[in-house]
Each structure stands twice: as C-alpha cells, then as structure tokens.
Image (spheres, rainbow, N blue to C red):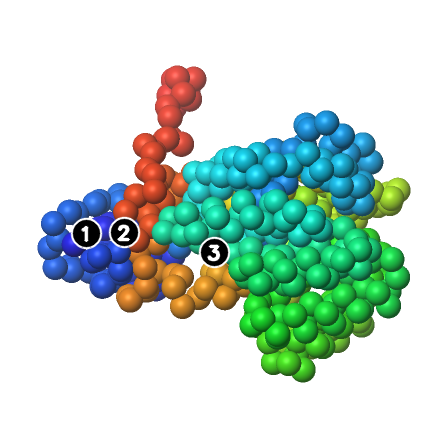
Amino acid sequence: MKKFTNARIYRQHDHASEILVDKGVITQIGTNLPEADEEIDLGGRLVVPPYVDAHLHLDYVYTARNEGATNTSGTLFEGIARWHDVKKTQTLEDARERALKGIEEEVSKGVQFIRTHIDVDDPKLTGLKAMLEIREQLRDNVTIQIVAFPQEGMYAYKGGDEMIEEALKMGADCVGGIPHFEWAREIGEKSVRRTVELAEKYGKLIDVHCDETDDVMSRFVELLNALVMIEGIGARTTASHTCSFGSVDNAYAYRMMGLFQKSGMNFTANPTENAYLQGRQDSYPKRRGLTRVKEMWENGINVCFGQDSINDPWYPVGNGNMMNILDNGIHLAQIMSFDELDRCLDLITYNGAKTLNVEDRYGIEVGKPANFLVLNANTPFEAVRQRADVLASIRNGEYLFKRPAPSYEIEIDLFRKTR
Ligand SMILES: [Zn+2]
C-alpha cells in the first residue's frame, strides 16, 4: 500500500489531500487516511489526471527533414502531397522506431493516453502493423487508440475504403475519414456515410478529420453529426479540426451547436498546427484556424485539444507537450477569465478522456487505476500561468518517471539589493 500525502487534487473540492493506493488502484481519497508501507509527500503540489493527447499522427513523426518532405507553402494540402512521397520509403523498423520515440517524448511530458491516426492508404499497411504491435507492448504504461485514417482519401485514393475495412479487421479502434479532401462534395458525403456504416458494422469508435479547411462551404460536420445522432452513437464519435466552423456565420453556428448538444458528439481542436496551416490564402486579417472552442465549451459540447504533429511535413515544431498546446489554445480561443483558467486543464485531461471513451478508467477517484501527474504548481491557475512542468507521472501507482522540482523562485542579486 502507498499513500500520497499533501496533494492538491484537481477538481477535488473538499480539501482532501491524501490518496491511498493499493495494487495500482485508488482505494481512498481523504484526510488522515490509514498508514501505508510507503508515504510520499507531494509538498502541496497540484495532482491532475494524466494528459490526454486526443489527436496525433504517430506514423508521421520525425519525417519533416526526410527527402521530399519539405512543405514550402505551409498548407495542409501540400503536406499531404509531401507525405505521399515520404511514405513510399517507410519500413516497418523505421515506422516502429519513430513511433516509439514519439510516444516516449509525449510520455516524458505527462501524456498517458494517445489517440493516433494511422494512414491506411498503403497497400502494405506498414504504419498500422507497427502501431498495432506497439499498442499491445506498451498497454500497461500508455493507452493508445488507433484510428484507421485514409490520409489520401477514402475514394480519392483507389481502394481506400477497403483498406480501412481491412485495418478495422486487424484491430484498429476507430474509423477515420477526410471528406474535405475527396474530389467532390458528393464523394465527401459518401465517405462520411461509409465511415458511420463501418463503425456500426465493426462496433468501432469514429474520429473524422472534418472540414480542416478555411472554406466555409465545407460543412461535413453537419452530415456526420446528423448520421451519428440518428444512430445514437454521438458520444462514440469525434469531429477533429472542424476549422471551417470557425469561419461560418453565427446563425448557422448556433443552430449546429444546438444539434451537437443533442448528439453528444466530441470535438478535437489542434491549436498550434491549425494556427500554422490555416489562413494561408488569406491576406489580412488572417484567420486563426481554430474551431469555436470557447463557444462549444460554454455550451456543454465536449471539446479537447491534440498535438497532431511532431516534426512532420505538416508542422515541424510539435514536441508532445500538452501544456504548450493548452497555452496556445486558450490564447487563440480567448479562454482567459479566472473561472476558465481554473478549469481549462480539462481541455487536455478530462475532456480528452471523454473523447477517447475511457472515462470508466480515468480520473482521480476511488476504484480507478492510480494514474496521475504531479505538477510543479500549487493551483490550477498557477499551473497554467507558469506553464508548469510535470514533476512525476504515476501509472497504476508506480512512477513512469519523476524529476526534481526546478524552482521558479530563484533569488536574483540585483533584486535582493534593491529591496
Ligand atoms: Zn490530424
């Protein structure tokens, strides 16, 4: 038995500061809990559930400098064209090595839950094979969900729909799609319908790259939402990106948000990547590339953040640091009231877990696995303001890592003399 004491527990409102862990599970939360074999004093620091990266591409990581990968226009569409060339040289060993490095980088920054899209527009399914193996190998330490994602289209890539079905049979967790990349609106719609059909047929979750464009006429989110609402699988569905929804007019947006509330569909935004990729054909003012995160959050629609890219043809400087993603996201979405700042860690924790449908084993609650982070801050506000480091990541009651606390309160000679 282990007891973590002197903790400030995120979302815990009754001042309980102790967490008792037995066999990897939280057995009690409170004060003056029974003694344990090992007691760990957390020094009043903030304890939060592990970070969730709800949208990442682990088959693309660290390919930004590969031959033929340079994306000179900085657009999504050139990124796709560049990846088309880069993936031809991908081997199983190379895919495996890069994905492991990407996961390690994320885990070292507090992520324990990752939903990764894997390109299945590949007759050999190289990336998928590597990822399925890694998912099982790392299962105890990091939870990975795999989306069967047709990067070059379900229909624009010949046989893409069949490759998705094959990937689902092999064990992918979610059905993906990219309707705004198909060659006509009708075909994009056909791909959304097929995504929902396949999810129903194989009992899988859905995560569609949806309307990742500045084109306000790209409204596949409307069809996706309607179809999953009819089937009653909104909570099992995610619309990723929905950048164009940030450009639609309010009359449309608010009608749709009413329908999103009803369906319970989840949304994932990727603030750094889309701020970089979108608005490329705008002069000034340039759009931010972000969907209506603030309004969704205010209206009780589940919305969370993802890193999307780590050093790939779409975005070179991703590093798996979800605190950085949150930092960018709250700026771009203008989420900054004190009340919002106290709660915005939800966007990289609880809301992501809801998107991944893992709430039954996520959160700091009795009966759940003892998975949590210790941040170098005493309150949620200070964690966000200081962009606090993760001092420890605990999985099933054991350290994945711990590191010494760097102090923000160094004494600078000049100020000591001036005082
Ligand atoms: Zn993506």
If you read the primary sequence from the N terminus, does the residue marked by circle 2 or circle 1 appear first? 1
Q: Could you tell whether 130 is left or right of 152 in the image?
A: left
In the drawing, what numbered circle is on residue 2? Answer: 1
SS for tag 3? Answer: loop
Determine the residue positioned at 68% across, 57% down: 163
Q: Which amino acid type is marked by label 2? A: Gly
Determine the residue positioned at 26% across, 43% down: 43
Q: Which amino acid type is marked by label 1? A: Lys
Residue 258 visible in image: no
Q: Position of residue 118 (x, y in %)?
A: 62, 50
For label 3, the residue is: 349
Q: Is residue 236 above or below residue 229?
A: above
If you read the primary sequence from the N terminus, does the residue marked by circle 2 or circle 3 appear first? 3
Does any atom of ligand 1 lie closer than 8 Å to the CB of label 2? no
Tell me how far mark 1 sits from mark 3, CA to CA.
Answer: 24 Å
Q: Could you tell whether 4 is left or right of 385 in the image?
A: left
Determine the residue positioned at 22% across, 57% down: 23
SS for tag 2? Answer: loop
Q: Do the residues labelled 2 and 3 touch (CB within 8 Å)?
A: no
